[in-house]
Amino acid sequence: MDAVYVVLALVGINAVSFLAFWRDKRLARLGAWRISEATLLWLAFLGGSAGAVAGQRLLRHKTRKEPFRSTLRTIIIIQIVAIAGWMSSPLWVEGLRAAALGR
């Protein structure tokens, strides 16, 4: 998969995640039906964790809610470990080498 598409997909899911936090905060203020915590956490798990954290911090939304905070942190740790494992794998190194050589 082309790196541009991966970056665009990550930007998109993070934007959707941030907007979901924004909407949930707005709905909370209005006393309306809210976006479920499971949905917010799934968006983070699918790659929108940066958008979720940005929404949490900038909007001051779900910052004290447990176990939501712990689950979001766990998702972020899992993603960091997965990315580190993927980047350190021989296939990743070989792919970089092939790209550098123009293969």
Image: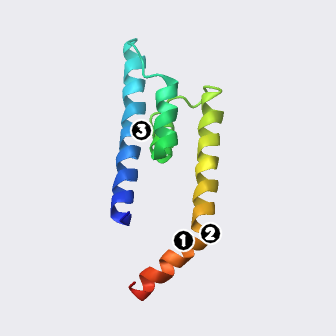
Q: Check disc 3 and give the amino acid type.
A: Ser
Q: Position of residue 23 (x, y in %)?
A: 36, 27
Which is closer to the viewer, label 2 or label 3? 2
Coloration mode: rainbow
Residue ID at (38%, 65%): 3
Is 69 placed above or below 93 here? above
Q: Earlier in the sequence, mark 2 or mark 3?
A: 3
| Label disc, if present, on residue 17 of the rendered structure | 3
Q: Position of residue 42 (x, y in %)?
A: 49, 34
Q: Check disc 1 and give the amino acid type.
A: Trp
Q: Residue at label 1?
A: 92
Is 10 placed above or below 63 here? below
Q: CA distance from mark 1 to mark 2?
A: 7 Å
| Label disc, if present, on residue 88 of the rendered structure | 2
Which is closer to the viewer, label 1 or label 3? 1
Is 90 placed above or below 67 here? below
* Quarter of the figure that contains the N terminus: bottom left
Q: Earlier in the sequence, mark 1 or mark 3?
A: 3
Direction bottom: furthest residue:
101
- Left or right: 84 with respect to 44? right
